[in-house]
Amino acid sequence: MGSNVSSVHDVHSSMEITSNGFVVEIESRRQWKSLFDSMKGSNKLLVIDFTAVWCGPCKAMEPRVREIASKYSEAVFARVDVDRLMDVAGTYRAITLPAFVFVKRGEEIDRVVGAKPDELVKKIEQHRV
């Protein structure tokens, strides 16, 4: 975990630490671009959690996402508020929330739409290596 945290932490000032993993709170376009660019050359799984403050199912999933992130520290979890970063949400067609988009080497490889923690774990298991 150490190298993952330090490299992402150096780029991102706002990070939510969990026991073994983390969820990066993306608060600006610059922050998103830094994370995305750093992940493009990596085979590491990026799980983008598209959310909104007004989204009840998103709020319900938040503790589960943190728990899942702690179990899969080999993946990078990023939370993006669709109202704050509409262009990023638009790029990934994050219309129904919550939406979890799986990215490797800069390309979307899968997604889970809705508050479906079991499906989220299944997809992470499938794509983490």
Image (cartoon, rainbow, N blue to C red):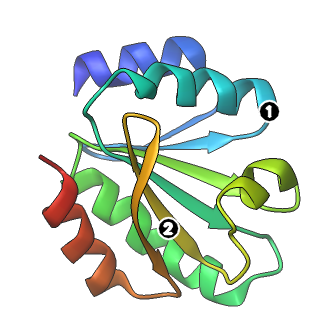
Q: Is residue 21 left or right of residue 39?
A: left
Q: Is residue 60 left or right of residue 121?
A: right
Could you give the CA–CA distance between mark 2 and mark 1, rounded to whole angstroms?
18 Å
Residue at (20% x, 76% y) in the render: 122
Give the mark nearer the N terminus: 2 vs 1: 1
The answer to whether residue 13 is visible is: no
Front-most of residues 123 and 65: 123
To which residue does mark 2 refer? 100
Front-most of residues 35 and 19: 35
Q: For the residue carrying disc 2, how many other residues have a C-alpha within 10 Å: few (<14), some (14-19), or many (20+)?
A: many
18 shown above or below 99: above
Residue at (33% x, 54% y) in the render: 69
54 shown above or below 6: below
* Amino acid type at mark 2: Phe
* Amino acid type at mark 1: Arg
The image shows a total of numbered marks equal to 2
Q: For the residue carrying disc 1, how many other residues have a C-alpha within 10 Å: few (<14), some (14-19), or many (20+)?
A: some
Front-most of residues 73 and 43: 43
Q: Position of residue 109 (x, y in %)?
A: 37, 57
Q: Are marks 2 and 1 in contact (CB under 8 Å)?
A: no
Q: Position of residue 19 (x, y in %)?
A: 28, 46
Helix, strand or loop for disc 2: strand
Q: Is residue 90 left or right of residue 106?
A: right
Tag shown at residue 29:
1
Q: Position of residue 68 (x, y in %)?
A: 30, 63
Tag shown at residue 68:
none
Specify the quadrant of the image occupied by residue 5: top left
Q: Is residue 34 left or right of residue 110?
A: right
Q: Position of residue 85 (x, y in %)?
A: 82, 49
125 shown above or below 28: below
Residue at (21% x, 40% y) in the render: 74
Residue at (22% x, 28% y) in the render: 1
